[in-house]
Amino acid sequence: MTMNNDHNSLGNPFDHRQSLIHGRHCDCQACSDDARTPSSPHHHDDSPQVTAPEARATPQGQEAMLDRVVESALVRGMFGHSDMHRRQFMKLVGGGTVAAALATLLPMDAIKAAVKEGLGPLEKTRLDVGFVPITCATPIIMAHPMGFYERYGLDVSVIKTAGWAVARDKSLNREYDAAHMLTPMPLAMTLGAGSTPEPFIMPAMENINGQAIVLHNDHQDKRDPQQWKGFTFGVPFEYSMHNFLLRYYVAEHGLDPDQDIQIRVIPPPEMVANLRAGNIDGFLSPDPFNQRAVFERIGFIHLLTKEIWDGHPCCAFATSQRFATENPNTYGALLRAIIDATQYSSNPENRSEIAEAIAPTNYLNQPVTVIEQVLTGRYADGLGGVQNVPDRIDFDPFPWHSMAVWILTQMKRWGYIEGDVDYQQVARDVYLATDAEKVMRELGYETPGETSRNYQIMGKTFDYTQPEAYVESFAIRRS
Amino acid sequence: MDRTTTEWKFSLNLRAGILAVVMLAVLLGLWEGLNHVPALGGGGAELSEYEKLMGGADETAKVPPPSEILTRAWEELSNPFYDAGPNDKGIGIQLGYSLYRVLTGYLLAAVIAIPIGFLIGMSPLMYKALNPYIQVLRPISPLAWMPLALFIIRDSEASAIFVIFICSIWPMLLNTAFGVAGVRQDWVNVARTHELSPLKTAFKVILPAAAPTILTGMRISIGIAWLVIVAAEMLVGGTGIGYYVWNEWNNLDLTSVIFSILMIGVVGMLLDLALSSIARLVTYQE
């Protein structure tokens, strides 16, 4: 299914027979197509969109579409957005005459060129984007079956990756043009922690919340973390929010994550099999594997990570600095597609539809009901109860600098990076909040208007301006 | 009495065949019977919301019965070449990718291993000089090469082929050297009395004499290569039968996993049969 909320700006403005409004009884091709797919969302706004809409309407190709959009906007502007007047006038004078007259009055070509500069011709339309099959990647994945990439003129293959180490290596090898990563990964890769240093950028966040601590069913009586001494936990990657949140959580309960428990890196898809085999006592991992462990009657959900830090970042859309500078227009189009898809995923009304789109073998390869429980937040907890937590997972593209600073403080705290760190500078270099803000504004989404803020994490305040003091405020730490 | 004994003798193969089939049937029957999932809902009671979210009222998942595997095999094999996107391809395409990687790595290894093996086999000096390196490199698990290969080659496809190459080179190299060194001195002497050039001696006398040993090495190699490709593809992902296993494991779909195990076995057997029939062409009686 594709989204069709853009085609209305593509009618020929010089044709008196065509409506540019597409009201309820409109019988144009695009609207009757829509009628056949009733579940697709309709936003019949009349404002012309500057970004390139999908190619199903009359004009073919990116360039032609943009031309049409500009013409349409001008003509609509001339007639004060009254479509009735426009159609009467065109009928009277003839579209060709108006077009010619308009061209003499206004430097049409120059205006068209100026608009295109915002996006420009794409350097590259065939892209490979990697993802690890978890619900955090929802926007990156669903943008494919639901046509968000196509809308921006991109032909993207979303390629499933077996784990984060391979995702990182394939990104460093440039087999992937961009990839789904964990929010700490681009920071670590830029700093060269755990890999060769290569500047990576993170222009958009994917999801917030959406992780959970799952324990094996045998531990139903051990809900207090202080009883977890000697447990083995799985996390998906060293440079992951999962690792840092688990460490933070047990440390706040007085356990040293390096001494009292064992933390083992296990790729997300292998978590459930390992839990079943008894190799681990629990894990802090991405969904759908938390819900899948419940579904398989192996484990139960001890707590959702939103209870540790509500609104914590998790996964990211990242690419190399090099890709962005070599292909600025493609990068721009890709970022627009991702931000659009992320905002669409954020709407709870769309969640069931998305669950169905991303469950097949080509994407997550999971039962629909598991994905749906994760995305809608109405889920079985494995203890016999049905919980209703609508923001169990949410999607928000804005890459807060302060989140990067928090992640860096934890990397420092646990000894993943040593020496002096210029927290604010690294955060600004990697988390491209300004790029995201620009695109979000352009697409008509609200932006927070600031790039940093303080957080409350398990009752403890994080002040982003004092990262070093924050690291030193913890009793359990490695540095 | 006499008739019955001949009848018994006559049907030994047949009886072995029947016994094998009966044993298989009993085994599969037990497997099927013990794993039969009770019908959902029992007395037609409505499932509670919790039970629905848990995917029904049945207990924990079991090993799938043979009937389910056969159904899955039929589904997959009746449409082996479908292509529903980069992450969802038919079993035929997946096996094709794996075979392509295995054969490329394997042939590269053969092209390098056989001449070097020849050299080592013919020259005791080279043998002594290279032996320590071979002994150190040979026992390394091919998957241990993967991170290094990904870093140096910077291409996951080529890395997978490299891993196949590095693991299939040793048996061929050692067997070639061994076969060449073991050629009977008499034959080489005969060649010398006929005043054959060293090159001609190598091709006309030593190669045919060592061929059965070389082929044995090649047969061991292809077996190892096929073993390794599954693991390599599980690690790198993307395409291939190893990726297929991983993807179904990811979905905890044991039916597909068992089906793919069978497919891996069948293809491995075919590869081995192919090489053993080539080996039969070059065997000789002294």
Image (cartoon, grey):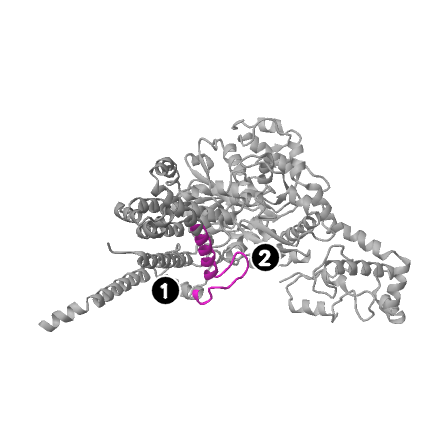
The Cα–Cα distance between marks 1 and 2, rounded to whole angstroms, is: 33 Å
Q: Point out the image quarter for the N terminus of chain A.
A: bottom right
The answer to if B103 sits in the magenta stretch is: yes
Mark 1 belongs to chain: B
> Secondary structure of the magenta portion, mostly?
helix
Q: Residue at x 54, y 38 (%)?
A: A239
- Which one is in front, A270 or B111? B111
Q: How many marks?
A: 2
On screen, residue B119 versus residue A148, left or right, reads: left
Q: Nearer the viewer, residue A268 or B12?
A: B12
**Badge 1: how crowded within 10 Å, few (<14), some, or many (20+)?**
some
The residue lying furthest to the bottom in this view is B3
The percent position of residue A453, horizontal first and vertical second, equals 67, 36
Amino acid tagged 2:
Ile
Q: Quadrant of the C terminus of chain A?
A: top right
Point out which mark residue B67 bears. Answer: 1
For residue A46, above or below residue A478: below
Callout 1 amino acid: Ser
* Residue B16 horizontal/vertical position (percent): 22, 64
Question: Which mark lies nearer to you, 1 or 2?
Answer: 1
Using residue A151 as the reference point, say whether residue B285 is left or right of it.
left
Numbered disc 2: secondary structure: helix
Magenta residue span = B77-106
In the rendered image, residue B105, in percent from the top left (x then y), is placed at 45, 50
Confirm whether residue B19 shows in the render. yes
Is A351 in front, or is A49? Answer: A49
Between A343 and B27, which is closer to the camera in this rendering? Answer: B27
